[in-house]
Image (cartoon, rainbow, N blue to C red):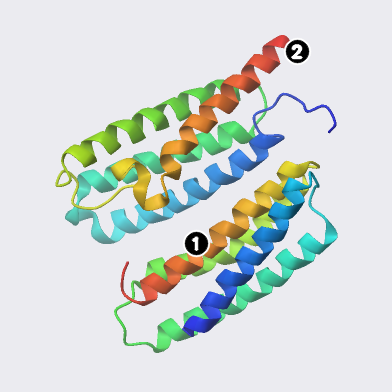
């Protein structure tokens, strides 16, 4: 898998988390820009899911496949889950949920890179 | 801010449920991989991982659901979680050879940024606070 793309996804997730944290501090619920940012990140993690599976199929590295695909899938599930769970809460804590979700995606991507490097 | 209903799954509790869900999913996935692929390597550690995963699942669902029964279940689950991380954390610090492979609670959750240690403390505070507000309402 192209490592630069993984790091880009992680950075994007941190960026969305930062915007959500800004809303949290300003005492605001999930707004439209946050929704679109989270949707854009979802596109990135879906691309990562496909690219990751293709890379796994073509590699001769000793990568623990089940764990690797599990992380890829979890990354793809989190943004929609966080937005759905966060939108239902019409307070600042709704954006707090998105902060947690996005930071989790960033951590998962970092772990993906580790697993790819063989440090499971 | 509008008046919040005293439920464990609303307001700040919404974030708490999200964090618990992350731990429920990651602990469950990790424990399934361990049990299915590597069970013979460290059976005790892996059974403990599975137990921790189950505790996180119960706590997540109980926190998210409304009603007095759910908040009681949440109190018990978080209590078990707190005892679990303290006991396993202490044992693994005193005797690092005890478990050949790490669990969520090893070294007080150091592998997970100590979140497993902080989470039950915050969770217990929140559940007790919510139950107190339910009683006074």
Name above or below for residue B44 compared with residue B64. below
Q: In this view, does B66 lie above or below A48?
A: above
For the residues labelled 1 and 2, say whether their Cβ atoms are less than 8 Å apart. Answer: no
Q: Where is residue B49 in the image (x, y as percent from the top left)?
A: 33, 45
Label 2, residues with CA under 10 Å away: few <14, some 14-19, many ≥20: few
Question: Same chain for marks 1 and 2?
Answer: no
Label 2 sits on a secondary structure element that is: loop
Write the residue at 18% across / 51% down.
B100
Q: Residue at x 42, y 70 (%)?
A: A68
Tell which subunit mark 2 falls on.
Answer: B
Seen at 58% across and 73% down, the residue is: A9
Q: Which chain carries label 1?
A: A
The residue sitting at 45% across, 44% down in the picture is: B115
Q: Residue B137 carries which label?
A: 2
Apparent side of residue B97 relative to residue B101 in the rendered image (left or right): left
| Mark number displayed over residue B31 | none
Q: Dot 1 lies on which element?
A: helix
Left or right of B52: which side holds B62? right
Alpha carbons under labels 1 and 2: distance apart: 40 Å
- Residue B89 makes an appearance in the image: yes
* Viewport quadrant of the N terminus of chain B: top right
Residue lying at the far top of the rendered structure: B136
- Which quadrant of the rendered structure holds the C terminus of chain B? top right
Judging by the rendered image, the residue that carries numbered circle 1 is A107
Residue B31 in the image: state x and y as whole percent.
35, 51
Q: Say above or below: A26 vs B55.
A: below
Q: Which of the two marks, 1 or 2, is nearer to us in this view?
A: 1
- Across and down, in percent, residue A11 comes to 59, 71
């Amino acid at each position: 898998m192209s490592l630069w793309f993984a790091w880009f996804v992680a950075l994007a997730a941190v960026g969305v988390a930062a915007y959500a944290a800004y809303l949290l501090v300003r005492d605001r619920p999930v707004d439209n820009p946050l929704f679109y940012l989270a949707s854009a990140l979802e596109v990135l993690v879906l691309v990562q899911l496909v690219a990751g599976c293709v890379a796994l199929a073509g590699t001769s590295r000793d990568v623990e496949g089940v764990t690797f695909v599990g992380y890829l899938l979890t990354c793809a599930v989190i943004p929609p889950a966080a937005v759905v769970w966060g939108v239902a809460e019409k307070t600042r804590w709704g954006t707090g949920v998105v902060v947690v979700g996005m930071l989790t995606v960033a951590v998962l991507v970092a772990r993906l890179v580790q697993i790819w490097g063989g440090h499971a | 801010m509008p008046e919040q209903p005293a439920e464990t799954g609303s307001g700040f509790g919404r974030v708490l449920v999200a964090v618990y869900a992350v731990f429920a999913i990651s602990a469950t996935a990790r424990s399934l991989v361990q049990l299915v692929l590597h069970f013979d390597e460290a059976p005790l550690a892996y059974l403990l991982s599975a137990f921790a995963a189950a505790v996180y699942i119960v706590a997540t669902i109980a926190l998210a659901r409304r009603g007095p029964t759910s908040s009681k279940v949440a109190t018990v689950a978080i209590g078990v979680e707190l005892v679990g991380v303290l006991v396993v954390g202490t044992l693994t610090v005193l005797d690092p050879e005890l478990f050949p492979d790490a669990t969520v609670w090893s070294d007080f959750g150091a592998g997970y940024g100590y979140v497993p240690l902080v989470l039950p403390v915050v969770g217990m505070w929140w559940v007790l606070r919510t139950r107190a507000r339910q009683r006074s309402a």
